[in-house]
Amino acid sequence: MRRTIRGLIRGGGLALGLAASVVQADPPVPVTQTELGQAGPDHAGMNHADMLAPKVPEILSGYGTGGFPITTRVPQAQAFFDNGMQLAHAFAHKAAIAAMAEAVRLDPACAMCLWGQAWASGPTINYGKSEAELEPLVAMVDKAAALAATAGTDRERALIRALGLRYRDGGGGKPGDLAFAKAMATLAARYPEDDEIAIMTADAWLMTEAGNAEDWRINAELAMPLLEAVLKRHPDDTGAIHFYIHATEIAGVAGRAEPYADKLARLAPHASHLVHMPSHTYYWVGRYREAGLTNLRAVEIGIENARALGLPPPDGVWGLPYHAHNVTYGLGGALEAGDATTALALGRPLVERAQTREHEGAYSQLIAANGYFALAQFADPAEVLALPQPRLPVLTVAWHYARGEAFARKRDAAGLRAEAAAIRALAGDLPDDGSREAQQFTFIARNVLAGRAAMLDRRPREAAFAFRQAAEIQESKAFSNVSDPPAWHFPVRRELARALLAAGDRAGARAEARAALAYRVKDPDTLQLLKDIGP
């Protein structure tokens, strides 16, 4: 499975007003340049939140579906419990926990309110929980079990027992998480028409231990039938749609979620993560421009949430890690689609801030490199060549790469070769996971520039050799899965096809272009290249 949140940077900016018609959400609130442009990579301080909790407890609307009747005599406790379920399904984690805590405050004798607080405080597909973080959750579950023994239903007691298994040697990908998933699967079989149990069971399978991509696929395939049954009964269930998008992406059948992805943002217009989620389908079915625009709306919602919560610009919104994921996914979609407006609006502030950073892990730097890709692809070469050199090694590679692309656009072969020569293997260990992929990134960048230089020198066979090396590294399992969306912004095999066409090998060019499309479905430039090659 691709990394979705770990190591995320804080960075970006946005083009306003473009996404509303795509996602069918409320019109965006204008944001200022201060809010857009002063953020950048920061690996530290993740807060497990899509948005922070309101300062005063309140029911938050527009986050989709969720909830079920529980044993309580306090109607407001039931309301906050249901809202907590909705927020949790939307990955508004801290707000969900706060809603459940308010339900507990309103009805201290409510076992399921306490269960809800413990459940919402647990691990997710993106975040694990440490042993220390689990200790108070075990206590909550034990207290809930004691309350439910005399005032609860059999279903409630079973849910509490199952959650107790998660928090003993669990926390994400551990034996307790597998025990929880199995217990929930038993409940799903006992209550086959229960939507919430099916959704929680599917979510639990997605968080069980997976040592490799095949394990992740198997877990996803266990989750999918549960979600499909819910969606057959209730096609607008946002929790089911959310996890179905995740499961189908992991299983390699993202297109199966497309009809649901198309309506998710409309069903949960205030949930930035759910507005973002369709891009996990759109990217893999080749709807790249919509992947970019969908994330623009999610970014706008993040800024709106920060304003509503009183988080001061420019830094407040960037403390919400899903906001950064929205920015980077929007940038990935825009780069693949050739959407210069979106890519530059996201990329320029990212580059500006990245150049000042002094301490970042390899993975964070890889993600920040997307800003340099945007400028390399769309900015005036003079702007790119005026950029100062960043202080971090992977970003320095991205800077040289962007300069090389600028020289290529100027048809300056000597300058291009100089930038390719300046890219060297990264020395020493980088302070983060992703170090191996950072080295691979270096080799891809150098070979792409070498191929560009050879093409300018009219040596297409030499260019083909360089592009082939880069494509093989890019398509390796390790590098292909390093980030979500992919860490390199276009299929390099497409450039190999161009080189072969220039060398007169039309059949070889056609074969490589088709292979590029198999790797990156519906890539617009590759589709155009195939038309140019002809039958």
Image (cartoon, rainbow, N blue to C red):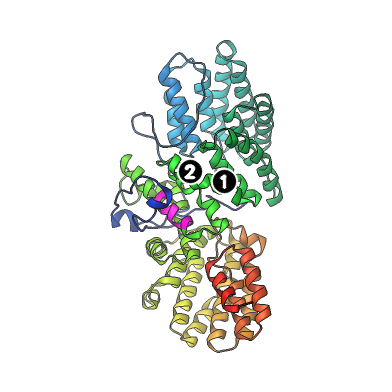
Q: Residue at x 53, y 67 (%)?
A: 524
Secondary structure of the residue carrying numbered label 1: helix
Q: Which residues are magenta?
A: 290-298
On residue 115, the disc is none
Tell me residue 446's x, y (percent): 56, 76
| Residue 163 found in image quarter | top right
Residue furthest out toward the front: 535
Q: Amino acid at mark 2?
A: Leu
Q: Earlier in the sequence, mark 1 or mark 2?
A: 1
Q: Nearer the viewer, residue 379 or 440?
A: 379
Element type at mark 2:
helix
- The reply to whether residue 67 is in sight is yes
Q: Horizontal placement of 15 versus 470: left or right? A: left
Q: Position of residue 294 (x, y in %)?
A: 44, 52
Question: Along the horizontal axis of the image, is 501 left or right of 319?
Answer: right
Report the residue that reaches farthest toward the top.
150
Question: Label 1 sits on what residue type?
Answer: Ile
How much space separates mark 1 and mark 2, taking CA atoms?
10 Å
Tell me if residue 129 is in the magenta stretch.
no
The answer to which quarter of the image holds residue 143 is top right
Q: Identify the residue under disc 2.
A: 264
Dots 1 and 2: beta carbons under 8 Å? yes
Numbered marks: total = 2
Mark whose residue sits in front, 1 or 2: 2
Quadrant (top left, top right, bottom left, bottom right) of the C terminus: bottom right
Residue on which the image places disc 1: 245
Label the magenta part by its dominant secondary structure.
Answer: helix
Residue 9 in the image, given as x and y percentages of width and height: 46, 55
Crowd around label 2: few <14 · some 14–19 · many ≥20 (10 Å): many
Image quadrant where residue 223 sits: top right
Please determine whether, in this image, residue 157 is positioned above or below residue 1. above
Pick the residue in front: 355 or 483: 483
